[in-house]
Amino acid sequence: MIAVNDLSLDASSRTVVRGEQRIRLTPLEFRLFACLVARAGEVVSREELTRELMGTEEEPRSNLIDVYVGYLRKKLGNYAVITTKRGRGYAIRTDDVGAGAPESAG
């Protein structure tokens, strides 16, 4: 399990949770988020995301990745977790990422 701010991503069960609430993601949204989290702190280009998610070597000719990042930001409810690196791609803020389950208070 990987914690990102107040979110937890569990790759084995393919779930994302905030507190006690499961966030429903489509398979593509989950793979996109998992790909970004796996490379937290690195800028991942649209081309790399297209290759990873779509299995194609072609350069992206559409804004599909941008659209799905938008969907993901809305569902996650925290626009700052995924940052846009203009002209380069997307990244997960490293100050918000940690391995393991989030600590519970008390």
Image: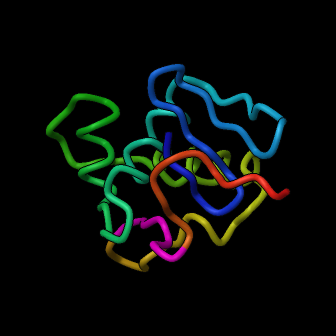
Residue at (71, 38) in percent of width and height:
17
Does residue 57 appear left or right of residue 30 in this picture? left
Which of the two residues, 52 or 105, is positioned nearer the viewer here? 105
Provide the residue span drawn in magenta.
89-95
Percent x, y for residue 106? Answer: 85, 57
Does residue 17 appear left or right of residue 53 in this picture? right
Percent x, y for residue 98? Answer: 48, 60
Above or below, 97 against 35 in this view is: below
Which of the two residues, 88 or 4, is positioned nearer the viewer here? 4
Residue at (14, 38) in percent of width and height:
57
Residue at (38, 62) in percent of width and height:
40
Above or below, 96 against 11 in this view is: below
How is this picture coloured? rainbow
Above or below, 58 against 66 in this view is: above
Does residue 78 appear left or right of residue 40 in this picture? right
Residue at (31, 61) in percent of width and height:
44
Which of the two residues, 31 or 16, is positioned nearer the viewer here? 16
